[in-house]
Image (spheres, rainbow, N blue to C red):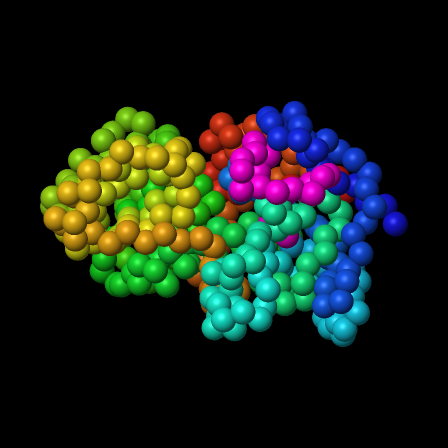
């Protein structure tokens, strides 16, 4: 059985992505084959494509961790869900039997991997995933909207709810509010009764961040966001800062945090080695939490809020998978607000 897929066979720019015909993956014991109706992009797609020592790929490699589709066939030992059932895929893979997995912290498993990263992802018409990674489909959302949920809402939920433990009335600063994590974090912070301040890279993105629930949005290209946060909080600073940008932004996030406040960081899209004055951390007793993904249970906590409409995925644009190079270039240029979604088979 054959399928169309977009793959990479070496690291590099968007030009290394190629549209090919491949053998369809076969589900093994405990696995399910999903017909991919939509796959959303993340910055992880860019990092894997560019390459680095952490990535050990089996070529041809398929990117894409955020998959929405329907059950196409079942592997041995799997009796449900029935073929044709609409599903959302939790992108984190783990062993399922270690202490971390059994305690509900599967994203701390020593064998943890992410679809599209160190495992084959959804840039194809079909994908094979463990049965335990299938999540209930969120209400009446389109496949494009559903695919825009998993990684970013899962990540933002762990950051704000499990790590920072955001509380009503607190001020939360969300860096890069136009990103996938950013649009999720703005909404989750509002859901928990926080006042949200956001940064974004253009007046248009600032306005969209306000429509999502940010009380104030700061154009970081035109304004000093540290000074603006201090002004908006009466010189106090934010209670919680959500940072996925890293680099110089992270160093400034420390300055924008109140004494005794919390910073949660899940990525470093602008650099891994910021210059930090540690005196601002220990004298002002700032807590810094690192965060990667979230457990399967966290996504199950998110989905009812999606279904009810309290949280909503934000799709910037939808493109056929055959135009993945164009999509990568757009994400790299920070042109998107929310998610870029690709449609296999089109």
Q: 235 or 297: which is nearer to us?
A: 297
| Residue 311 placement (x, y as % from top left) | 45, 58
The image quadrant that residue 317 belongs to is top right
Q: Is residue 30 left or right of residue 278?
A: right
Q: Main secondary structure of the magenta part?
A: loop
Q: Residue at the location (34% across, 60% down)? A: 163
| Residue 94 placement (x, y as % from top left) | 58, 61
| Residue 109 placement (x, y as % from top left) | 51, 62
Q: Is residue 161 left or right of residue 57?
A: left
In the image, residue 121 sits, relative to residue 249, either above or below, namely below
Q: Residue at the location (75% across, 72% down)? A: 78
Q: 199 or 271: which is nearer to us?
A: 271
Q: 96 or 125: which is nearer to us?
A: 96
**How many numbered marks appear?**
0
Q: Is 211 contained in the magenta span?
A: no
Q: Residue at the location (83% across, 46% down)? A: 23
Q: Residue at the location (28% across, 51% down)? A: 288
Q: Residue furthest right?
A: 1
Q: Is residue 252 left or right of residue 231?
A: right
Q: Is residue 238 left or right of residue 106?
A: left
In the image, residue 236 sits, relative to residue 246, either above or below, namely below
| Residue 141 placement (x, y as % from top left) | 60, 57
Can I make out residue 227 in this image? yes
In the image, which residues are magenta?
48-67
In the image, residue 236 sits, relative to residue 322, either above or below, namely below
């Amino acid at each position: 059985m054959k399928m169309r897929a977009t793959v990479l066979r070496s690291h590099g720019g968007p030009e290394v992505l190629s549209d090919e015909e491949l053998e369809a993956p076969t589900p093994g014991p405990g696995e399910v084959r999903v017909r991919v109706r939509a796959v959303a992009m993340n910055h992880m797609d860019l990092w894997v494509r560019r390459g680095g020592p952490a990535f050990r790929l089996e070529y041809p490699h398929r990117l894409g961790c955020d998959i929405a589709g329907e059950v196409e066939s079942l592997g041995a030992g799997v009796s449900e869900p029935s073929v044709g059932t609409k599903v959302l895929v939790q992108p984190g893979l783990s062993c399922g039997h270690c202490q971390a997995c059994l305690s509900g912290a599967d994203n701390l498993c020593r064998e943890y991997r992410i679809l599209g990263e160190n495992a084959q992802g959804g840039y194809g018409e079909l994908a094979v995933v463990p049965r335990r990674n299938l999540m209930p489909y969120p209400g009446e959302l389109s496949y494009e909207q559903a695919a825009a949920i998993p990684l970013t809402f899962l990540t933002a939920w762990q950051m704000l709810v499990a790590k920072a433990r955001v509380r009503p009335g607190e001020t939360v600063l969300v860096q890069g509010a136009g990103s996938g994590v950013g649009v999720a974090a703005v909404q989750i912070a509002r859901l928990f009764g926080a006042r949200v301040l956001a940064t974004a890279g253009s007046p248009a993105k600032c306005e969209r961040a306000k429509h999502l629930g940010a009380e104030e949005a700061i154009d970081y290209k035109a304004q000093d966001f540290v000074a603006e946060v201090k002004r908006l909080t009466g010189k106090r600073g934010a209670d919680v800062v959500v940072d996925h940008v890293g680099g110089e932004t992270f160093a400034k996030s420390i300055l924008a945090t109140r004494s005794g406040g919390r910073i949660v960081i899940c990525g470093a899209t602008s650099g891994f080695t910021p210059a930090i004055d540690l005196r601002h951390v220990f004298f002002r007793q700032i807590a810094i939490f690192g965060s990667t993904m979230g457990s399967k249970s966290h996504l199950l906590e998110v989905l009812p809020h999606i279904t009810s409409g309290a949280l909503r995925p934000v799709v910037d644009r939808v493109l056929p998978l055959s135009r993945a190079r164009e999509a990568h270039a757009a994400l790299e240029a920070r042109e998107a607000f929310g998610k870029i979604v690709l449609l296999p088979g089109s």
